[in-house]
Image (cartoon, helix red, strand yellow):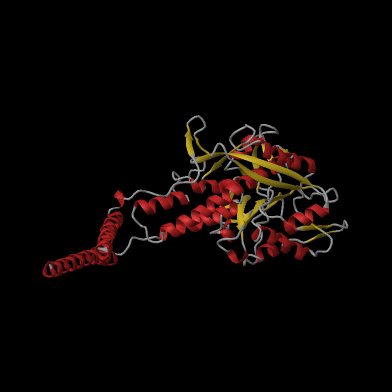
Amino acid sequence: MKKVFICEAILLLSIIQICFMTNFIISIGFPELAKTGVQSPFKYAWDPEIQAYSLMADHVFPLRLYILSLPSVGNARFSNHSDIVAGVIKATEIRRGNNESNEFRVYAPDVFAIFQNAVRINVSISCYIVDDWDSYRSIVETFNNTIILNTHDEYLPVPTGYSKEAWVGMIADFMANRWSTWVNIGGYPMSRVCYQNGTTEEWGTNGFEHLWSYTGRHNITCYTGHENESGPVIDRSNMWTAWQYKPYYDDASLGFPVKTSDFSGSFGVSAFEPLFVFAENQSTESGRSISFSFNQSTFNYGIYVHLGVWRFMTVDGIEGPGGFTAGFLASQMAIYSELWPVTQFSPDFEYSAAHDLIRAETEGRLSGLNAAKTLFQEAADCLVKGYYKMSNSYANQAAAAAISSSRESQTYTIMSVVVLVVTPIGIGLGIFRWRRKNDRKKTKVQ
């Protein structure tokens, strides 16, 4: 009797297995019948009043900004240092696209429709003024997921115990290994040095070249020779807000822009983007956020924010004090560059990781998709903690895994059908024959 019970249990399990595998095979062959299991871990809702998506209204995303303002270090390009600091602080108080206290509007990185696909999020920005050398040194040496804004334009402050080269190396480590951001506000970055003991020296183009050499890029310099030429600002989105508090600036000087060709293929957000093309066909960007990673790593990275402008002109061509506007623009660029990875989680954005995962599952490309889902969850966990760059790296990996996912091969599917259907049937027939033979033996005994 016990043997009969065991055999019937095996037969029942075999039937369940057939049903399960049949459903699995239908899912592969007919993706429209498969239930989509990928969902964004965050809630998005379209708000017609602001023409933007609202993301997790009950969650506040944290952000830390450190304003480097050392009393013993001056400025090379701006006459009023306090104006720069005021502009940076004002940018942290006013969120892009909204004047409410804790809202910021982030746009999906689509160069052809920069004002489409907006996401409104709640942000808590902690802003600190760093006015002593020991704090400055400690932040660069030990902090992570941090933004430092250098309000001393071309001057690089170097603390005691470091050479200028070694300190640039520490800043490179701060960005690349500790997911942080360094912001240059106006002029040619790191072209002058101010040591903690008060001595200064010219460094020319070597400081900027030395910084980028850590990424495997060599001979990287800003575009020079046309710094006083002016032109209209193409993306005025941030300047519109700045104009509410200072004179109406319509044009900006070229300053010392980066060369677009030097950073092709790098992550870039040009929240302020005057583009100029000269006779030698040199495309430049006076304001740009650029990913910074050792040996151009695809995972660990920081951000270098470049603003090479220091002159701003009114509609009448009159130059005004540009410190406030420069500080405001650079700060907004840094904030926007830090927060834009939230767009990776909207299934409605064509270039988001969420969109790629859902598309892969809907099309039945299930092979390799579990790995993509795991990476996507890692990205979500990092975003909630405020590790935005790390979140973006996981999201990019998830998107890549989803894009490379594939359907199960037809040969494999057919063989699975044969093995998984025929085997239980064979087991069932064997049980049937065994019971029948056993019944005959019992009849003879009787």
Quarter of the rendering containing residue 83? top right
> Residue 385 versus residue 13: which sits nearer the camera?
13
For the N terminus, the quadrant is bottom left
> Residue 85 versus residue 294: which sits nearer the camera?
294
Q: Which residue is depicted at the point 44% across and 45% down?
A: 347
- Residue farthest to the top? 49
Compared across the picture, whether 306 is left or right of 119 comes to: right
Task: Where is residue 55? Give x, y as percent.
Answer: 53, 39
- Residue 445 lies, with reference to residue 118, above or below; the image says below
Residue 351: in sight, yes or no? Answer: no
> Residue 65 versus residue 248: which sits nearer the camera?
65
Q: Which residue is depicted at the point 53% across and 54% down?
A: 378
Q: Which residue is depicted at the point 50% across and 29% down?
A: 49
Task: Where is residue 407? Give x, y as percent.
Answer: 33, 60
Compared across the picture, whether 194 is left or right of 367 comes to: right
Quarter of the rendering containing residue 224? bottom right
